[in-house]
């Protein structure tokens, strides 16, 4: 995207102390909140910058590289950091992996461990929808050590039920189970 950046409709706070540009959207959010939930931002804010005014205004935003997060993923991360209602976070459903996969990638890049743990735990809770997305889900969970054994076992169970012919003892042990 090019052109003049636009302000986020939901995450441009008058008292925010950081103007962050993701793609063509400006977010005015809080350094303390980002630092509390992201090792990446915490380390960045501790490191002296050659431009001491970067991130202070719309004219000099701190620009987040596209390979760290898309606008869609960063907006969802803001939904987690700034819930609209106290204690009510966005639903994470296994059937919406196309939405959550890039968000998980962004949590990895931005070192947002607690957000990644939350997303993975909610995927685990949505067990009824795991069979419909089992292969895609496996592709995600093998990349994150925070994925619980329960989530991995749920995938293995779906795999075993739907495998024809049933896997050999050797193949079963490769799935992470001792037989």
Image (cartoon, rainbow, N blue to C red):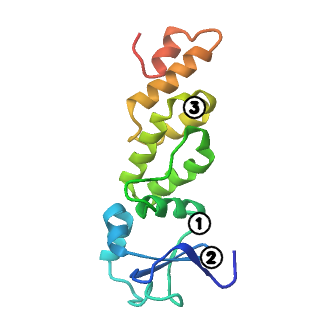
Q: Dot 1: what SS? A: helix
Q: How many marks?
A: 3
Label 3 near label 2: C-beta < 8 Å?
A: no
Vertical side of 6 occupied by 103: above or below: above
Q: Dot 3: what SS? A: helix
Measured as percent of width and height from the top left, residue 135 is found at: 60, 31
Label 1 near label 2: C-beta < 8 Å?
A: yes
Q: CA distance from mark 2 to mark 1?
A: 8 Å
- Of labels 2 and 1, earlier in sequence is 2
Q: Which mark is residue 71?
A: 1
Can residue 64 be seen in the rendering of this structure? yes
**What residue do we see at 62% from left, 76% from top?**
24
Q: Is residue 10 left or right of residue 111?
A: right
Label 3 near label 1: C-beta < 8 Å?
A: no
**What residue do we see at 39% from left, 29% from top?**
149
Measured as percent of width and height from the top left, residue 162 is found at: 62, 17
The residue furthest front is 85
- Could you tell me which quadrant the N terminus lies in? bottom right
**What residue do we see at 48% from left, 25% from top?**
154
**Crowdedness near tag 3: few (<14), some (14–19) or many (≥20) residues, C-alpha within 10 Å:** some
103, 87: nearer the viewer: 87
84, 144: nearer the viewer: 84
11, 39: nearer the viewer: 11
- Of labels 2 and 3, earlier in sequence is 2
Which residue is disc 3 drawn over? 129
Q: CA distance from mark 2 to mark 3?
A: 34 Å
**Crowdedness near tag 2: few (<14), some (14–19) or many (≥20) residues, C-alpha within 10 Å:** some
- Of labels 1 and 3, earlier in sequence is 1
Measured as percent of width and height from the top left, residue 169 is found at: 49, 9
Q: Which mark is residue 24?
A: 2
**Crowdedness near tag 1: few (<14), some (14–19) or many (≥20) residues, C-alpha within 10 Å:** some
2 or 3: mark nearer the eye: 3
């Amino acid at each position: 995207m090019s052109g003049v950046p636009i302000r986020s409709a939901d995450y441009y706070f008058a008292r925010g102390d950081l103007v962050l540009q993701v793609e063509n959207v400006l977010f005015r959010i809080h350094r303390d909140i980002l630092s509390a939930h992201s090792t990446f931002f915490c380390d960045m804010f501790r490191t002296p910058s050659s431009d001491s005014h970067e991130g202070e205004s719309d004219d000099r935003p701190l620009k987040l590289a596209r390979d760290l997060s898309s606008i869609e993923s960063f907006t969802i991360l803001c939904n987690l950091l700034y819930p609209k209602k106290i204690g009510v976070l966005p639903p994470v459903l296994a059937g919406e992996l196309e939405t959550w996969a890039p968000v998980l990638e962004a949590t990895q890049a931005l070192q947002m461990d607690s957000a990644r743990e939350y997303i993975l735990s909610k995927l685990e809770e949505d067990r009824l929808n795991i069979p419909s997305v089992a292969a895609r889900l496996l592709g995600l969970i093998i990349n994150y050590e925070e994925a619980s054994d329960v989530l991995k076992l749920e995938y293995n169970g779906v795999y075993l039920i739907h495998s024809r012919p049933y896997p050999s003892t050797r193949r079963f042990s490769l799935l992470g189970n001792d037989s």
